[in-house]
Amino acid sequence: MRSSKVVLNILSSVLSILFFALILIVVLRAGRGAYDLGYRIFTEPAMDREPGRDVSVRVTGHMSGSELGSLLEEKRLVDNGFLFAIQLKLSSYEGKLKAGSYTLNTSQTAEEMIQILAGEEEEEAEKD
């Protein structure tokens, strides 16, 4: 009887240690993922080096940030459309993008594209 109690205590201890180790691994991976996402939001590089290639984009007035991000990802102007939508949401330009046709370049960062789409750099945009 006494030996079975010892075995159960040892088994219980081992399972507790494994459970806490699993929790620790999950927390560390989630933290690493959150850090990587946060880092990319603020430091995402351009798709290409200078001179890049020019791409025409048409922005409509009812386009959401995620729709715009998907469009830019489809045209290979950004690597991740969802990440672009987050960058737009966190920028001071949210809700300030202007409808029109724009010529963007693959050597521009998401921040530079957002500024152009908001009309901050008028010389880059071809307005309708």
Image (cartoon, rainbow, N blue to C red):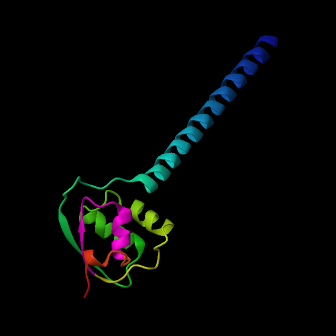
Q: Is residue 52 left or right of residue 16?
A: left
**Can the viewer see residue 81?**
no
Residue 71 occupies quadrant = bottom left
Q: Quadrant of the C terminus?
A: bottom left
Residue 32 location (% of width, % of height): 51, 42
| Residue found 49% across the figure and 52% down from its top | 38
Seen from this angle, which residue lies furthest bottom?
A: 128
Image quadrant occupied by the N terminus: top right
Q: How many labels sit on residues? A: 0
Residue 39: percent from the left, percent from the top?
47, 49
Which residue is pictured at 56% across the width and 40% down the height? Answer: 26
Task: Tell me the magenta residue range.
Answer: 101-117
Compared across the picture, whether 75 is left or right of 97 comes to left
| Residue at the spot 26% in from the left edge and 85% down from the top edge | 127
Say left or right for 15 vs 50. Answer: right
Of residues 115 and 24, which is closer to you in this image? 115
